[in-house]
Amino acid sequence: MPRIFRLPSEFALHPGARRLVEVDGHKIALFNVDGTFYAVADKCPHHGASMLEGKLEGCILECALHGLGFDLRTGAMRYGGLIARTYPVALKDGLVEITLPE
């Protein structure tokens, strides 16, 4: 059964902001893109670089190390290939909820 983690309201980022959070041993890069929250593992599937520091254009996040672009909505690499781990995330009752797999 998936686990839902609720983070305090200070993690509710304003649009355009990002933050690194650690939830149950998972390092997660949390983004607010135009009011929609996205969460992706803070480890590029190519060589493990931090995703938090990547360039963000819309929902495409480019890894800071090699510039590979990943769609925050799906984790899919632009033009196919690798997939970054994404996590469902929502803002409910002032709390950020991130759902982790079993």
Image (spheres, rainbow, N blue to C red):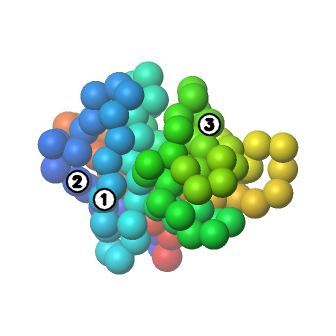
The CA distance from mark 2 to mark 1 is 9 Å
Where is residue 30 drawn, in percent x and y? Answer: 39, 48
Residue 12 visible here: yes
Q: Secondary structure at mark 1?
A: strand
Residue 92, disc: none
| Pick the front one: 65 or 72 | 65
The CA distance from mark 2 to mark 3 is 24 Å
Contact between marks 2 and 1 (CB within 8 A): the answer is yes
Q: Residues within 10 Å of mark 2 (few under 14, many from 20)?
A: some
Q: Secondary structure at mark 3?
A: strand
Contact between marks 1 and 3 (CB within 8 A): the answer is no
Q: Nearer the viewer, mark 2 or mark 3?
A: 3
Residue to which mark 2 is pinned: 7
The CA distance from mark 1 to mark 3 is 20 Å
Q: Which of disc 1 and disc 2 is earlier in sequence?
A: 2
The amino acid type found where label 3 is placed reads Ile
Picture residue at 51% right of the left edge, 69% below the top: 101
Please state if 58 lies on the left or on the right of 98 as rendered: right
The amino acid type found where label 1 is placed reads Val
Rendered image quadrant of residue 18: top left
Residue to which mark 3 is pinned: 60
Rendered image quadrant of residue 45: bottom right
